[in-house]
Image: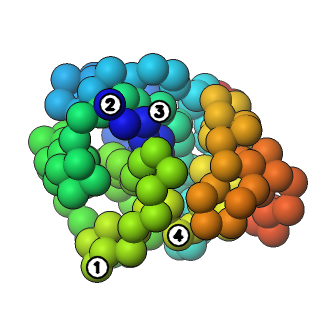
Amino acid sequence: MSVCFLLLGTNMGDKVTNLRLASDHISSQIGPVITSSSVYTTSAWGKEDQDDFLNQVLKVYTDKTPAQLLQCCLSIERDLGRVRFEKWGQRLIDIDVLYYDDLILDDEDLKIPHPEIQNRRFTLVPLVEIAADWVHPEIGKSQRELLDVCGDSLEVKVC
């Protein structure tokens, strides 16, 4: 079994229910959720003229390959009603693969670790809550160290 960290995000509809349903689907289709961060609220990042987001990070055990994991995440998003309108636009649910063991992967469709982890407080704050000492395999710093030097000033608050 491999360990992966997934970031969930939503800013449409019943946001708390969206996160719960995504977590339930992940448990049944990807593997057991071992740890969940608190749910955090943040202003929109990248495209600010939209509703605030709720974000949560899950630590999951999986027997899926990275490619299978990505396909499962995309399938869950579709099953829950996600339609992709625009980059960084509002979304019913978003599931990003952050880490998969200590794998470094640079495929056209999937990059692991997620290339923006170190630049986003809405990702680092929940990661630090559940995996502060997890080391980024490319950068060589823990999540806590990445958060300490992150230049993103966006406020991230526990709901």
- How many C-alpha atoms fall within 10 Å of the one at disc 1: few (<14), some, or many (≥20)? few
Quarter of the rendering occupied by the C terminus: top right
**Circle 1/circle 2 CB separation < 8 Å:** no
Q: Which mark is residue 119?
A: none
- The picture places residue 13, in percent across and down from the top left corner, at 34, 40
- Residue 120 in view, yes or no: no
Give the alpha-carbon distance from disc 1 to disc 4, as whole Å: 13 Å
Question: Is label 2 in a helix, a strand or a loop?
Answer: loop
| Front position in the image: 73 or 90 | 73
In primary-sequence order, the first of circles 1 and 4 is: 1
Give the alpha-carbon distance from disc 2 to disc 4, as whole Å: 24 Å
- Marks 2, 4: nearer the viewer: 2
- The picture places residue 29, in percent across and down from the top left corner, at 18, 31
Give the alpha-carbon distance from disc 3 to disc 1, as whole Å: 24 Å
Q: Which mark is residue 108?
A: 1
- Residue type highlighted by circle 1: Glu
- Residue type highlighted by circle 2: Met
Residue in view at x 52 percent, y 25 percent: 36
- Residue type highlighted by circle 4: Pro
Quarter of the rendering occupied by the N terminus: top left
- Marks 1, 2: nearer the viewer: 2
Question: Is label 1 in a helix, a strand or a loop?
Answer: loop
Residue 77 shown left or right of residue 139 in the figure: left
| Front position in the image: 79 or 104 | 104
Residue in view at x 47 percent, y 33 percent: 58
Q: Which mark is residue 58?
A: 3
- Residue type highlighted by circle 3: Leu
Give the alpha-carbon distance from disc 2 to disc 3, as whole Å: 16 Å
